[in-house]
Amino acid sequence: SDSHFPVPISPSHVDYSLHYPHFFPSSGEVNCTKKIQFADVGCGFGGMLISLSTLFPETLMIGMELRDKVTEYVKERILALRVSKPGQYENVSVVRTNSMKYIPNYFEKGQLSKMFFLFPDPHFKEKNHRRRVISPHLLDEYAYVLQVGGIVYTITDVEELGDWMKRCLESHPMFEALTEEEIEADPVVKLLSTATEEGQKVARNGGQTYKAVFRRISPSL
Ligand code: SAM
């Protein structure tokens, strides 16, 4: 249950020196003012983060994962990469948490420039829709932590969930869909299916995927 992992009481209590020691050495003066900018929500085994890490080497990013063992695996994976490729993967980390409860504990208003919701659990039954990681209520929180212009990336192989995520985003006043041209031009979109473990599984089985990519906008008055 949630009581087994610590939760920072506010974003200023997130210990950056623990996650990114290369950028925030625990001893000596820390001049770094960087903040986490990408969040991979329900990151699973971390494939997306590992790919993003080298694509955006100066951007701090974090995976949020509920399962203890999976989180430990991602931690070990990152530490091993830091050893085998010195100077790389210092900008990526993972935390065990329930993202549906604690996003505002980790990020302040307008902090994030990208959020990822990749192959989230479908929760098919109607009474369980409130457990979906994209919902009208949770989009309010995501809009709060995203900067204007920030991007939400979603992908799933479950058509019904794909429709649901798209519908929630379309109905929200603080999000607008990227155009086809913008989606085509964004190198991150290609990674949604190729870099994630779930995406690779779907591709192996020849399955279809459904994406929704939306931008945080300022609400019109
Ligand atoms: N994004 C990864 C990928 O595409 O390979 C993993 C997808 S997996 C189907 C969904 C992941 O979300 C699981 O690892 C699960 O433990 C995690 N998860 C589910 N609910 C969560 C929550 N409330 N907070 C954080 N992670 C959650």
Image (tube, grey):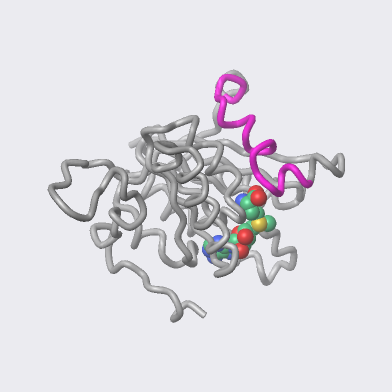
Residue 83: where, in percent of width, then height? 46, 45
Magenta residues (range): 183-201
**Is residue 197 inside the magenta stretch?**
yes
> Which residue is rendered at x = 83% and y = 41% of the image?
204
Q: Quadrant of residue 121?
A: bottom right
Judge left or right: residue 30 versus residue 196: left
When the figure is inspected, residue 179 is found, relative to residue 163, above or below; the finding is above
Ligand 1 is in which quadrant of the figure?
bottom right
**Is residue 64 inside the magenta stretch?**
no
Residue 153: where, in percent of width, then height? 56, 40
When the figure is inspected, residue 148 is found, relative to residue 169, above or below; the finding is above
Say which of 87 and 185 sits in front. Answer: 87
Judge left or right: residue 195 versus residue 202: left
Residue 216 visible somewhere in the drawing: no
Residue 29: where, in percent of width, then height? 13, 47
Residue 66: where, in percent of width, then height? 54, 66
Judge left or right: residue 219 versus residue 158: left
Image quadrant in which the C terminus is located? top left
> Which residue is rendered at x = 65% and y = 44% of the image?
196
Judge left or right: residue 85 versus residue 206: left
Tell me the chief SS of the magenta region: helix
Residue 85 visible somewhere in the drawing: yes
